[in-house]
Amino acid sequence: MRNTGRHPEDQIWAGGDNTLGPNLAVNAIAAGLTAAEGILTSFSLLQRIRRQV
């Protein structure tokens, strides 16, 4: 189903949250972290934060 969205049953397709399964929360957290790093980098804050830690 991941390549085409088609379910093994005939005439059924799925996408989005329905196809991600239990990894949905993990993927959402990872995407949030990536976005946060991008925001901090764009404001030159990420390097300052890393130096303080």
Image (cartoon, grey):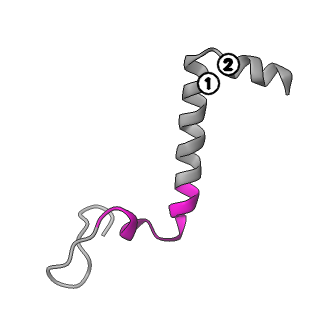
Q: Residue furthest bottom?
A: 9
Q: Which residues are magenta?
A: 15-27
Residue 14: x percent and y percent?
27, 70
What type is the residue that disc 2 sits on? Leu
Residue 18: x percent and y percent?
37, 70
Is 34 displayed left or right of 17 in the figure?
right
Give the CA separation, mark 1 to mark 2. 5 Å
Residue 27: x percent and y percent?
53, 54
Q: Quadrant of the C terminus?
A: top right
Q: Residues within 10 Å of mark 2 (few under 14, many from 20)?
A: few
**Residue 12 or residue 36, whichever sits in front:** 36
What is the chief secondary structure element of the magenta stretch? helix
Is 25 displayed left or right of 16 in the figure?
right
* Residues marked 1 and 2 touching at CB (< 8 Å): yes
SS at badge 1: helix
Identity of the residue drawn at 56% across and 37% down: 34
Q: Earlier in the sequence, mark 1 or mark 2?
A: 1
Identity of the residue drawn at 43% across and 65% down: 20
Q: Is residue 21 magenta?
A: yes
Q: Residue furthest left?
A: 11
Q: Quadrant of residue 47?
A: top right
Is 47 displayed left or right of 30 in the figure?
right
What type is the residue that disc 1 sits on? Leu
Vertical position of residue 51 compared to residue 1: above or below? above
Vertical position of residue 11 compared to residue 17: above or below? below
Residue 45: give its label: 2
SS at badge 2: loop
Q: Residue furthest right?
A: 53
Residue under numbered circle 1: 40
